Amino acid sequence: MAAPMFKVNAHRYDPYRTFMFQVVIDGNPVAGLKKMSILKKSTEAVKWRTAGDPAHERVLPGGTSYEPITLEQGLTHDTVFEDWANLVNNIQGNAAMSLKEYRKDIILNVLNLQGEVAISYRVYRAWVSEFQALPEFDAGTMNAVGIQTITIQHEGWERDEGVSEPTES
């Protein structure tokens, strides 16, 4: 028999599901969140050769870049995406951006099936680079749900080690 993967819940063998997640912006969970893109970083490989050793190529880690995160929210009266996007380029007045508040640290939570936070990541200095306010409308599709989308750029993320595995019943 295989050893359990979970320290607190020795009865558990299954990994966490991808439909149980939460994004927290300004301390509030985003309502009606449908989808989030992957959390990914890449480190550039720098190749070099040592003088006198032309046969061996060495590889060093270079700079790290972080993929943008895309969030999709069902179309509601919640204006969290639009309000944040307007901080980057406000159409009111002189179209200046809010240098004080346009960058935000956000929290990404993975929940267990009981709705408790199991894994948490902090994303640092995120800002909205793309905002889709309305979807394409089509009177011929009665069962479609309207989706708003934002793409956020950020300067990195790390796992919140303060979040421990919840005890499941």
Image (spheres, rainbow, N blue to C red):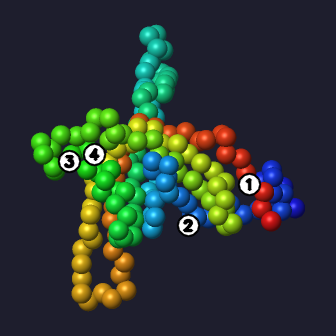
Query: Judging from the image, what secondary structure is the residue with disc 3 in?
Result: loop
Of callouts 2 and 1, the N-terminal one: 2
Residue in the image at 80% along x and 65% along y = 169
Residue in the image at 37% along x and 64% along y = 78
- Residue 19: mark: 2
Residue 54 lies, with reference to residue 66, above or below; the image says above
Give the left or right position of residue 148, taking residue 92 as reference. Answer: right
Q: Give the mark toward the camera: 1 or 3.
A: 3
- Residue 90: mark: 3
State the separation of the CA atoms marked 4 and 3: 6 Å
Mark 1 belongs to which amino acid? Pro
Of callouts 2 and 3, the N-terminal one: 2
Query: In this figure, which residue is indicated by the disc labeled 1?
Result: 166
The answer to which quarter of the image holds residue 94 is top left
Q: Exactly how many numbered labels are in the figure?
A: 4
Mark 3 belongs to which amino acid? Asn
- Residue 129: mark: none
The answer to which quarter of the image holds residue 140 is bottom left
State the separation of the CA atoms marked 4 and 1: 36 Å
Give the left or right position of residue 40, taking residue 164 as reference. Answer: left
Q: Give the mark toward the camera: 2 or 3.
A: 3
Residue 158 in view: yes
Mark 2 belongs to which amino acid? Phe
State the separation of the CA atoms marked 4 and 2: 29 Å
Q: Residues within 10 Å of mark 1 (few under 14, many from 20)?
A: some
Of callouts 4 and 2, the N-terminal one: 2
Of callouts 4 and 1, the N-terminal one: 4
Q: Give the mark toward the camera: 4 or 2.
A: 4
- Residue 87: mark: 4
- In the image, residue 72 lies at what x, y percent? 39, 63
Q: Are marks 4 and 3 in contact (CB under 8 Å)?
A: yes
